Image (cartoon, helix red, strand yellow):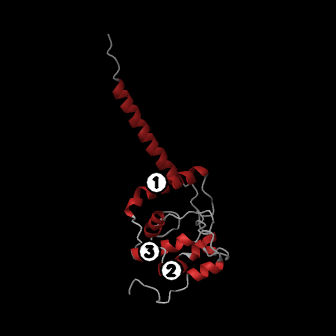
Amino acid sequence: MSSPPNTPLIIAGTLAVAAVLGCVGTYAFVISGLYDVSATTPDSKLVYWATHQTMEHSVAARLGENVVPAGLDLPATIATGGQIFVTNCAVCHGRPGVDRTPIAQGLNPTPPDLYRADREPDAQENFQFIKHGIKMTGMPAFGPTQTDEQVWALVAFLNLLPGITAPDFDAAIAPPAGGLRHRDA
């Protein structure tokens, strides 16, 4: 009489072999150079979906760390954020009524349209994007160069952008009567 097969051992062995083959196949794909990483080649729908879902879930998992401060609607805070935006962000995200810069035209993925009227800004999410950046998108982390107060001021400014006109944009970035607050001040 023969003994019955050890089914759990067979399953474990099969899974181990499949895992090794998966790793070897992934490594072979990575070193093959088949995947075009150039910014001029759009991502496939699958790659776009996978990277976008990864980003969305990663950001959502960290939103609780971002406590929205009071005063984001103050004109001085908004103007401070506007000046930071013009200095650091407009090169990629543009301004209303102005053509996109050559830098913005060369980015893949394309920077989001912050002026779209139906866009609904999320302060916690924008703080996360601005402070920590987003890998492989061209969105840098401003946490190393800006204080949290400056990042929140920029968030306050972003809250105004959906549907804003060029004249209203210019008015919003005008320095307040008391001047702008700087990191070194």
Pick whichever of labels 1 and 2 is earlier in the sequence: 1
Count of marks, rendered view:
3
* Disc 2 secondary structure class: helix
- The picture places residue 132, in percent across and down from the top left corner, at 43, 67
Q: Residue furthest top?
A: 1
Quarter of the picture containing the C terminus is bottom left
- Image location (x, y in percent) of residue 75: 50, 80
Residue type at tag 3: Gly
Q: Using the image, tell me which numbered label, if any, was put on residue 20.
A: none
Residue drawn at point x = 33 percent, y = 23 percent: 6
Q: Give the mark nearest the N terminus, 1 or 3.
A: 1
Q: Which mark is residue 71?
A: 3
Residue denoted by label 1: 57
**Residue 125 visible in the shown view:** yes
Disc 1 crowd rating (10 Å Cα; few below 14, some 14-19, many 20+) is few
Residue occupied by mark 2: 75
- Label 3 environment density (alpha carbons within 10 Å; few <14, some 14–19, many ≥20): few
Identify the residue at horizontal 39%, vertical 65% (top origin): 67
Q: Distance between the residues labelled 1 and 2?
A: 33 Å
Labels 1 and 3 touching (C-beta < 8 A) = no
Depth order, front residue of 172/73 = 73
Q: Is mark 1 on a helix, strand or loop?
A: helix
In the image, what residue occupies the spot 46% across and 54% down?
Answer: 57
User: Where 114 sits versus 18, above or below?
Assistant: below
Numbered disc 3: secondary structure? loop
